[in-house]
Image: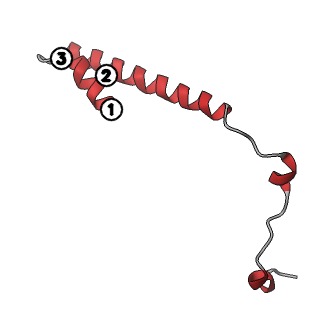
């Protein structure tokens, strides 16, 4: 997707300034996508504190592997 944006911004007759401009556009889109992803992680549901801190339970078949 970012490559398509880069080549669209590059245009039909690429030159050195066109490459720089296209790279700026592509990297700006990348930065926006990273920012959106970071904000989206803030709206994810969180686990309850009691469940997050509870010790994991081993299945009975593996209980003998725990050091005593």
Q: Is residue 13 left or right of residue 55?
A: left
| Residue 36 against residue 12 in the figure, above or below | below
Q: Is residue 11 left or right of residue 31?
A: left
Tell me where residue 38 appears, x and y as whole percent.
Answer: 59, 31
Q: Residue at x 22, y 15 (%)?
A: 18
Q: Which of the pair 34/48 is nearer the observer? A: 48
Instruction: Please tell me whether mark 1 sits on a helix, a strand or a loop.
Output: loop
Instruction: Please tell me whether mark 2 sits on a helix, a strand or a loop.
Output: helix
Identify the mark at residue 23; answer none if there is no mark.
2
| Residue 44 against residue 68 in the figure, above or below | above
Identify the mark at residue 51; answer none if there is no mark.
none
The reply to whether dot 2 and dot 1 touch (C-beta < 8 Å) is: no
Image quarter in which the C terminus is found: bottom right
Q: Which image quadrant is residue 62 in?
A: bottom right
Callout 3: 10 Å neighbours few (<14), some, many (20+)? few
Circle 1 or circle 3, nearest the eye: 1
Q: First in sequence, mark 3 or 2: give its number.
A: 3
As measured in the structure, the alpha-carbon distance from the residue carrying label 1 to the one carrying label 3 is 16 Å
Instruction: Please tell me whether mark 3 sits on a helix, a strand or a loop.
Output: loop
Q: First in sequence, mark 2 or 1: give its number.
A: 1
Identify the mark at residue 1; answer none if there is no mark.
1
The reply to whether dot 3 and dot 2 touch (C-beta < 8 Å) is: no
Q: First in sequence, mark 1 or 3: give its number.
A: 1
Q: Which image quadrant is residue 55 in?
A: bottom right
Q: Which of the pair 65/42 is nearer the observer? A: 42
Q: Which of the pair 54/22 is nearer the observer? A: 54
Q: Which residue is mark 3?
A: 11
As measured in the structure, the alpha-carbon distance from the residue carrying label 3 to the one carrying label 2 is 12 Å
Looking at this rendering, what residue extends furthest in the front direction? 45
Q: Residue at x 41, y 22 (%)?
A: 29
Q: Residue at x 41, y 20 (%)?
A: 28
């Amino acid at each position: 997707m970012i490559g398509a944006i880069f080549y669209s911004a590059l245009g039909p007759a690429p030159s050195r300034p066109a490459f720089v401009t296209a790279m700026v556009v592509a990297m700006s889109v990348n930065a926006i996508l990273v920012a959106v992803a970071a904000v989206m992680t803030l709206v994810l549901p969180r686990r309850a504190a009691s469940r997050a801190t509870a010790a994991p339970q081993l299945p009975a078949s593996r209980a003998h592997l725990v050091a005593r």
